[in-house]
């Protein structure tokens, strides 16, 4: 009785997370990327609460709080500040145009379903339905990093990728131990700060955050 | 007997269509802080148009004069096939969801040809843009149908409705929700609403549907406008009755029929409000951005099909 | 009955061929040719229909003829009978049309090769030979007969293609066609050789019996060779290159026959080898066919959209429709490999129905294009327009064909596309998830080609026939001759009939593959009275009732309007000009402009090249004298696949050329050396 509700809620949350990830492939406006990331993080923290409730693991509430603090409040704040400095920038001409990247994302989700089939068959957790969607989110994050030119977008793509891994771990094993989770958060934070410095430097050197410009450093 | 009721519900849909268009306009006006014309204004417009002389271009051929009848006829035929107050009993076997899509394509095809006939650049441009949008919206429609048909075991509208009525839990699965979103975007594209096409514009930069029917006047224009309103009603009916079928009359008693009519009008009004809000909120997309929107809807439909495929 | 029909068929074609050679010029000769072809095709049609309805197989053999290669063996089973019916359906209207069309060749307007007098006659002879060889391919029962007739078919069609050899590009197109046809022939022959283990004289029966014993790898190689060989005939991407070259340059009734019938024989071969002789195979065979079909369908229609040459557009559209048929066939093979026989039967019925429909509407479209060409002497859509008023019958028939190919109800294209969709929808029953997941993608691609086809034919019909003529020849166009109109009318009627009466056709099609390759012996059960209903109730619709309803509504609405005393006055006036006076053809939309949005949307697939040359005034850069913009779309398989291949062949040819020194003594030396070598080999080895 409780199981179907759990399964439905977790699948719904995983689908929402994936849809917010797809928004990065659709929109061109950098501000909307930050909004998408923030909404996605909200959904994932809710998912943490849900899994903590049904899986009877109070530690996950703590992780959810940490998640909210870091990814719903702190990171989007800094990202918005950064984005306001480059307010004129938009993802005008990505390497792969919007319809093609969306369709490729769809095919990637199909691939994720095909890849995850044995895992889903073996698992007997109620959350197993959302596993392919989490893998799909990881693919989408990868696709964003590969096909978008602005460094800012690539940062958010990396963060989405990270979110995808989190969701995968959450749905697959009801989360990882708190200490590991803390370590992962710290890693993400460090990586994020390094990228911030990188973007500011890039902008300072080339007056644009187009990663293509790095080609000019060749000779 | 049931066949008469089927025809009656189609005629009711026909009668409600101009009111629906008027309602959307009225909502938009109120949202934009204007008074706006009353929701039954389009009825007066139709009466006026039917009373006017028609002007036909010298260059046009018989196709120009026949097209409004074909468009109106095919759209009306679709109205007879879809569930508005109840799932059509006798006529349900005549056409399924795929037949509905292709009948609507028949109307678009004829209208595009009629746009090319007078030999103006406006008509050609409208026809070209309309066919582009219709072509790119087709995969989404097909996949949404596929998803619905998978769950119901059939492409028959009656069976799809019955399936959702039978399992209420089905209505909130992610697959269903994503299919609804995809179909909503296609509705905007097919009926020519913002952000795909502006139904109130007369600038050639922004016209799609308006450009095709620019040469029409008199009773021809009345038929085409009515058909456009009916198409909007058909899409709204599909959106509401395939995904939220509660309120449809299951047994055909007078009480349930009246309840069905009332619930249908409420659903239409709700969707009209949503569309009006959307039209006030977003700007029209540039033509070459429309494929991006439609490919997003395609991916949504694809995801919905996959999730219902795998989670069966 | 059949004892009469078969000799009648042979006699009809022979008569037509002789009439072609000896009949002399003038309308008598042309009509005798048409009579012979029509008689032969009609007899074939009757024969095929009889076999399908009766269910049995008919056998003729003459082992003495070509006895060294196993003799001439013919066997007509239901699969071959279906294609005989197809040939009949395509050939009769084309023959009638051809009688009127070939008149253009007589007054020397299109001079042939070196002997203008043998122009129309040779084409009449070749036409009958072509039809006869196609019929016999469908009836062949051993390897030798099949290959012999296949080759005869290729050669006769080659001669037909180059009928108008004085036109620019015809001979080159013919060369491409011949080259690719022989490439296909080599693949098919190699496949058969592998199958029969080197035995030239093997009959299909022995192949069928020995198929199960072959190792799986060998079966797959045979299948791939058959797919390559028959696929190039059918026009699958990337082996389709000859199609858009050969179809436009051939006379229009020949184009109709090639598009409607010839390329379907590639399908026949594929079905015969993979399903009948090999008895089906692993799922990836069907998956490969499905994938190739989907790619052909989408690419075919995309290139059709960009064409301004009316007949090339129709040729690319044939590639698209063959893709759709292959999708149905591939789905059928997949279902067959998983043992879902009912669904397999449904898929094959859908594919065969689309084959029949395509012959009807594509034939009609090509005949219409031929009428336009006959009247205006140009295929370029940018120079046409306004023909609906000058050629009303042709325009009406072309409209029927365009609506049919866009799958609009209630015509035939709609019914077969509906069937293909239902077959693909059944894909969720496949046990293997990976295979099942490609079905949604296939459905999406099918829907995309359907939408694009509608756009393409709005362009084809609208730009060619509507609005104002864009050039003087278009202004002076005249209606087609009665013979041509009769041919087109027959096909239009067929399109309507196949669309409105599917319940008469589908049971017959269900019988075609009964008992072949492990499909159940009782035919696919599709029940109807007036509706088309699937097993397990998956979908139901009634095209006949829809047609009745549409016609009723179309008739009713004006009556109701009249009753309501609606204003019925009409004024004729100039087109609204936004303030300008006068309208010239240059103000109309062009074909290129119509397809421009789709070109932009799919630009990463098309990769158009753009060249912009601006001439400035010598005095100042601010005054522009002329601007020239040139854009071209070259299909990228031409760049990637064919150019390197052609370069390689030219290189090899240059190497071999060294042997040709022109010296008589050197040639004598070659001959003597070979002789001595042979003697040594025979004596000591």
Image (tube, coloured by chain):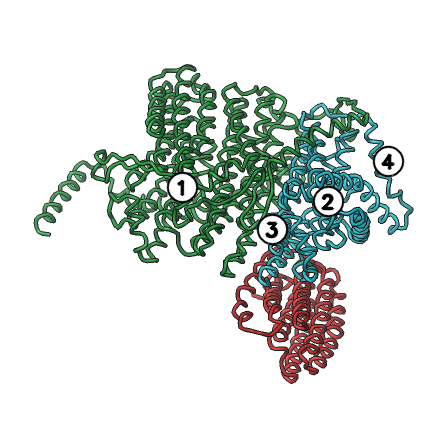
Chain colours: A red, B cyan, C green
- Where residue C410 sits in the image (x, y, percent)? 60, 35
Residue nearer the viewer, A133 or A67: A133
Q: Is residue B68 left or right of residue C152?
A: right
Residue displayed at 57% across by 49% down: C537
Q: Is residue C22 left or right of residue C323?
A: left
> Where is mark 3, residue-wise?
B154
Image height of C567 relative to C543, above or below: above
> Where is mark 1, residue-wise?
C268
Question: Chain for mark 2?
Answer: B
- Where residue C439 sits in the image (x, y, percent)? 54, 54
- Tell which tag, 3 or 4, sits nearer the viewer: 3
- Where residue C324 sits in the image (x, y, percent)? 51, 44
Q: Is residue C557 left or right of residue C46?
A: right
> Where is mark 4, residue-wise?
B44
Residue displayed at 75% across by 55% down: B246
Q: Quadrant of residue C622?
A: top right
Name of the residue lying farthest toward the left = C683
Q: How many marks can you see? A: 4
């Amino acid at each position: 009785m409780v199981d179907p509700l759990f399964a439905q809620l977790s699948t719904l949350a995983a689908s929402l997370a994936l849809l917010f990830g797809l928004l990065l492939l659709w929109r061109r406006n950098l501000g909307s990327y930050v909004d998408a990331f923030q909404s996605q993080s909200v959904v994932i923290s809710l998912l943490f609460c849900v899994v903590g409730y049904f899986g009877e693991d109070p530690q996950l509430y703590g992780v959810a709080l940490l998640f909210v603090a870091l990814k719903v409040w702190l990171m989007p704040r800094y990202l918005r500040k950064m984005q306001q400095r480059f307010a004129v920038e938009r993802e005008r001409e990505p390497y792969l145009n919007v319809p093609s990247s969306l369709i490729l994302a769809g095919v990637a989700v199909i691939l994720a379903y095909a890849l995850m089939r044995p895992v889903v068959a073996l698992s007997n957790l109620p959350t197993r339905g959302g596993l392919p969607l989490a893998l799909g989110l990881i693919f989408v994050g990868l696709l964003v990093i590969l096909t978008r030119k602005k460094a800012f977008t690539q940062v958010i793509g990396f963060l989405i990728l990270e979110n995808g891994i989190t969701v995968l771990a959450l749905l697959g094993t009801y989360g990882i131990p708190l200490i590991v989770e803390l370590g992962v958060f710290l890693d993400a934070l460090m990586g994020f700060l390094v990228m911030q410095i990188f973007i500011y430097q890039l902008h300072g050197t080339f007056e644009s955050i187009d990663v293509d410009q790095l080609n000019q450093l060749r000779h | 007997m049931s066949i008469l009721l089927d025809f009656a519900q189609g005629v009711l849909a026909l009668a409600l269509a101009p009111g629906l268009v008027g309602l959307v306009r009225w909502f938009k006006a109120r949202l934009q802080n204007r008074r706006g014309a009353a929701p039954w204004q389009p009825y007066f417009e139709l009466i006026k148009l039917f009373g006017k002389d028609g002007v036909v271009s010298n260059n046009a051929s018989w196709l120009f004069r026949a097209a409004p009848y074909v468009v109106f006829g095919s759209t009306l035929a679709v109205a007879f096939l879809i569930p508005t107050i109840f799932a059509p009993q006798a006529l349900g076997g005549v056409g399924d969801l795929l037949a509905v899509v292709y009948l609507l394509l028949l109307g678009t095809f004829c209208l595009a040809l009629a746009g090319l006939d007078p030999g103006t650049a406006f008509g050609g441009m409208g026809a070209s843009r309309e066919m582009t949008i219709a072509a790119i919206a087709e995969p989404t429609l097909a996949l949404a149908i596929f998803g619905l048909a998978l769950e119901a075991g059939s492409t028959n509208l009656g069976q799809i409705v019955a399936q959702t009525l039978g399992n209420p839990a089905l209505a909130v699965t992610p697959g269903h929700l994503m299919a609804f979103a995809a179909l909503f975007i296609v509705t905007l594209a097919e009926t020519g609403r913002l952000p795909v096409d502006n139904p109130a514009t007369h600038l050639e930069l922004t016209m799609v549907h308006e450009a095709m029917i620019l040469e029409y006047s008199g009773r021809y224009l009345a038929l085409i406008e009515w058909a456009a309103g009916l198409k909007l009603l058909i899409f709204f009916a599909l959106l509401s009755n395939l995904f939220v079928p509660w309120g449809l009359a299951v047994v055909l008693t007078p009480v349930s029929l009246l309840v069905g009519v009332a619930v249908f009008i409420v659903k239409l009004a709700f969707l009209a409000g949503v569309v009006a809000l959307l039209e006030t909120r977003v700007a029209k997309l540039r033509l070459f951005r429309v494929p991006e929107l439609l490919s997003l809807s395609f991916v949504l439909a694809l995801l919905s099909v996959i999730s219902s495929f795998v989670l069966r | 009955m059949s004892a009469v029909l078969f000799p009648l068929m042979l006699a009809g074609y022979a008569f037509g061929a002789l009439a072609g050679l000896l009949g002399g010029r003038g309308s008598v000769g042309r009509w005798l040719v048409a009579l012979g072809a029509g008689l032969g095709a009609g007899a074939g049609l009757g024969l095929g229909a009889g076999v399908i309805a009766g269910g049995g197989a008919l056998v003729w053999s003459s082992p003495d003829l070509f006895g060294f290669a196993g003799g001439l063996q013919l066997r007509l089973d239901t699969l071959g009978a279906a294609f005989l019916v197809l040939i009949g359906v395509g050939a009769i209207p084309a023959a009638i049309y051809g009688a009127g069309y070939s008149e253009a060749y007589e007054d020397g307007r299109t001079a042939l090769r070196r002997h203008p007098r043998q122009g129309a006659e040779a084409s009449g002879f070749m036409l009958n030979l072509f039809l006869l060889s196609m019929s016999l391919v469908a009836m062949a029962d051993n390897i030798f007969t099949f290959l012999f007739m296949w080759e005869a078919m290729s050669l006769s069609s080659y001669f037909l293609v180059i009928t108008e050899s004085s036109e620019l590009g015809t001979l080159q197109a013919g060369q491409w066609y011949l080259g690719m046809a022989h490439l296909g022939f080599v693949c098919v022959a190699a496949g058969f050789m592998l199958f029969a283990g080197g035995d030239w004289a093997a009959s299909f029966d022995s192949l069928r019996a020995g198929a199960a014993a072959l190792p799986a790898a060998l079966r797959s190689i045979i299948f791939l060779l058959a797919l390559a060989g028959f696929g190039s005939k059918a026009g699958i991407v990337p082996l389709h290159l000859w199609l858009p070259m050969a179809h436009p340059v051939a006379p229009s009734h020949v184009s109709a026959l090639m598009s409607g019938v010839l390329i379907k024989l590639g399908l026949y071969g594929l079905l015969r080898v993979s399903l009948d002789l090999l008895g089906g195979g692993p799922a990836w065979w069907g998956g490969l066919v499905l994938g190739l079909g989907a790619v052909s369908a989408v690419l075919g229609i995309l290139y059709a959209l960009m064409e301004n040459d009316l007949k090339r557009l129709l040729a690319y559209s044939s590639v698209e429709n063959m893709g759709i048929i292959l999708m149905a066939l591939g789905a059928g093979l997949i279902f067959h490999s998983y043992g879902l026989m009912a669904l397999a039967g449904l898929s094959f019925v859908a594919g065969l129905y689309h084959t029949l429909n395509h012959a009807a509407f594509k034939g009609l479209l090509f005949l219409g294009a031929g009428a336009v060409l006959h009247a205006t002497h140009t295929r370029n859509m940018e120079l046409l327009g306004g023909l609906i008023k000058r050629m009303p019958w042709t325009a009406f028939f072309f409209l029927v064909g365009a609506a049919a190919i866009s799958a609009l109800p209630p015509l035939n294209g709609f019914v077969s596309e509906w069937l293909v969709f239902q077959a693909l929808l059944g894909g969720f029953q496949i046990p293997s998830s990976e295979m099942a997941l490609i079905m949604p993608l296939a459905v999406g691609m099918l829907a995309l080609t359907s939408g694009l086809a509608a756009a393409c034919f709005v362009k084809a019909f609208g730009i060619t026939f509507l609005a104002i003529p864009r050039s003087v020849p278009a202004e002076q166009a005249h209606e087609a001759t009665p013979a041509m109109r009769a041919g087109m009318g027959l096909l239009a009627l067929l399109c309507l009939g196949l669309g409105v009466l599917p319940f008469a056709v589908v049971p017959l099609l269900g019988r075609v593959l009964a008992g072949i390759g492990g499909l159940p012996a009782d035919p696919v059960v599709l029940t109807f009275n007036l509706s088309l209903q699937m097993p397990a109730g998956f979908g139901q619709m009634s095209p006949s009732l829809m047609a009745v309803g549409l016609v009723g509504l179309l008739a009713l609405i004006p009556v109701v309007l009249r009753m309501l005393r609606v204003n019925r006055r009409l004024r004729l006036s100039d087109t609204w000009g936004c303030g300008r006076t006068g309208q010239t053809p240059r103000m109309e939309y062009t074909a290129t402009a119509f397809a421009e949005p789709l070109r932009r949307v799919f630009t990463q697939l098309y990769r158009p090249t753009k060249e912009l040359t601006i001439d400035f005034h010598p005095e100042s850069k601010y005054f522009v004298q002329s601007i020239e913009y040139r854009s071209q779309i070259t299909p990228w398989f031409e760049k990637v696949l064919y150019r390197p291949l052609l370069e390689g062949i030219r290189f090899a040819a240059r190497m071999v050329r060294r042997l040709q020194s022109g010296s008589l003594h050197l040639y004598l030396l070659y001959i003597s050396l070979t002789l001595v070598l042979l003697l040594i080999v025979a004596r000591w080895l």
